[in-house]
Image (cartoon, grey):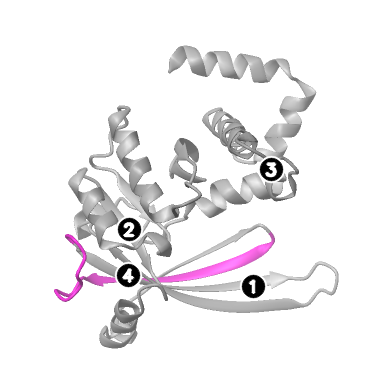
Amino acid sequence: MVAALVHGLGTVIGQTAVDEKSNEIPTVRDLLRRMVTTGIELAGAVITLDAMHTQTETAGLIRAMGADYVMCVKGNMPSLHRRLKKTIPWSKIPASVTDDASHGRKTKRSLKIVQAPEWIDFPDTAQIAQIRRTRTVKNTKTGKTKTTWEVVYLITSASPKAAQGLSIRGNPPVLPDNRLHWVRDVTYGEDKSLIRTANAPRVMATIRSTAISLLRLDGATNIKKANRDHARFPERTLTLTLTLIETA
């Protein structure tokens, strides 16, 4: 399954299954087209994707829809990754640093942004960024901590002026893995589910995404706690669902 998640709200506005004979790359493009044909306005939006979808065709489609992209550059684009790493004087560029703690780990991010060089062969690339993540995880049983670090590069068509209001500046983009897939896997136990035949897994994934979206629209910031609250007062679930349907 691939899903489109609204960053600010944490809600799913589109989801589709990957064909058995295909892969996620064309599926994401199909999902974007389907969203537009069903009336979801993408013009002016900023779309973030993980490294698998750092493709010139995908970037071109997003720009043709009037939206901007933020794409990760990792090992799947070795030449571009190498040039971003080696040819940009990152050590001379000032960084903004943020810290956060979630899911039992502490993460420190250092973000540097510069104007994109002309040799980047992606449609309308305006800026590139380097993000250095340092994660510290404490083992609750032994008390020992383990620190790992990772450096990733981003390319975006968003202009420097537009980026001032985006999550790319000061608070690097959070991909759906954290706000959607992690919640479905851990809170709703999707990975442990024994429902695996025919369309049932797709249906259950849609139901879980819908539940997460409803709770977030109701103001929930902790899905696990929200589930407990609704389990104690099931009439709240019906009231919430009817209210959101009436206001849609």
Q: Is residue 219 above or below residue 178?
A: above
Q: Which residue: 43% across, 18% down? A: 248
**Residue on which disc 2 sits:** 70
Q: Say whether residue 119 is magenta.
A: yes
The disc, 2 or 4, on the residue closer to the chain's N-terminal end is 2
In the rendered image, residue 55, in percent from the top left (x then y), is placed at 31, 62
Residue type highlighted by circle 1:
Thr
Label 3's element?
Answer: loop
In the rendered image, residue 181, in percent from the top left (x then y), is placed at 58, 49
Q: Is residue 186 above or below residue 108?
A: above
Residue type highlighted by circle 2:
Val
Label 1's element?
Answer: strand
**Residue on which disc 3 sits:** 196
Measure the C-alpha gap from mark 2 to mark 4: 10 Å
Q: Residues within 10 Å of mark 4 (few under 14, many from 20)?
A: many
| Res 138 quadrant in image | bottom right
Q: Which mark is residue 4?
A: none
Q: Which residue: 20% across, 44% down? A: 66
Front label number (1 vs 3)? 3
**Residue on which disc 1 sits:** 136
The region drawn magenta spans 104-124
Measure the C-alpha gap from mark 1 to mark 3: 35 Å
**Residue on which disc 4 sits:** 129
Towards the viewer: 44 or 34: 34
Front label number (2 vs 4)? 2
The disc, 4 or 1, on the residue closer to the chain's N-terminal end is 4
The answer to whether any part of residue 164 appears in the image is no
Residue type highlighted by circle 4:
Ala
